[in-house]
Amino acid sequence: MKIREQLKEMFQMQRTLNKSILDEFGEESMTEEKLELAIIDELGELTHELKGDWCWWKKSQAPVNRKRVLEELVDVYHFVMTSEMMRKYSSTDEVIDSILNKYEFSINHFDELEKERLDYLIGDISYSYDKLTVLLQLTKCLQFSFDDVYQECLNKNKINYERLKNGY
């Protein structure tokens, strides 16, 4: 399956999950402010999971757990996808296609994306208008394949639905 198809499925799963969460909590919608804060929070959790690679002042820092890093990266994907759909005020399949069209170059050239500095990428996601491009670059920087992201997204989706079923 190509990255575009994987992303489309991820967006569709996120749309369904968002609706289920809003229904569960009796909410009509999410605000842009809350979504941006959620992205920043997840980026913080991701950075914390990477601390073993960059924390030079603490000998007791645990080594990086790549599985946990991938889990946190996928959490960032969840909120970035939600943000992209919210910007379009809709999440129909046509809107998802238009989002994917916007990012077509980055999606098609994922394997060629240059490794950027981690600090720049993490900072850029929270204020960039092109969040998905920066997130794809971050994925490459962290040396994950898109298949890794897709599989973890499928896993997290199952976990999130179990939590919803059990009252979060």
Image (cartoon, helix red, strand yellow):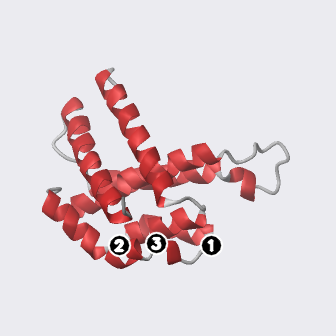
> Which quadrant does the C terminus fall into?
top left
Which one is in front, 118 or 68? 68
From the top left corner, tell me how far across and down residue 87 is, in percent. Answer: 23, 64
Q: Give the answer, above or below, for where 167 lies relative to 146.
A: above
Residue located farthest toward the right when viewing the structure as drawn = 59
* Lateral position of residue 58 relative to residue 111, left or right: right
Secondary structure state at the residue bearing disc 2: loop
Q: CA distance from mark 1 to mark 3?
A: 16 Å
Q: Amino acid at mark 3?
A: Phe
Disc 2 crowd rating (10 Å Cα; few below 14, some 14-19, many 20+) is few
Pair 1/2: label in front? 1
Q: Are marks 1 and 3 in contact (CB under 8 Å)?
A: no
Residue 161, visible in the rendered structure: yes
Which residue in the protein does label 2 denote? 129
Q: Residue at x 21, y 62 (%)?
A: 96
- Residue occupied by mark 1: 117
167 above or below 63? above
Q: Relative to 65, is 57 on the left or the right?
A: right
**Residue farthest to the top, as pictured:** 166
Q: Earlier in the sequence, mark 3 or mark 2?
A: 3
Could you tell me how far apart the alpha carbons at marks 1 and 2 are, in whole angstroms? Answer: 19 Å
List the residue tagged with mark 3.
110
* Residue 155 sits in quarter: top left
Q: Toward the viewer: 18 or 10?
A: 10
The image shows residue 146 at horizontal and vertical percentages of: 47, 59
The secondary element bearing badge 3 is classed as helix
Q: Amino acid at mark 1?
A: Arg
| Residue drawn at point x = 35 percent, y = 26 percent | 162
Mark 3 residue crowding within 10 angstroms, few (<14) / some (14–19) / many (20+):
some
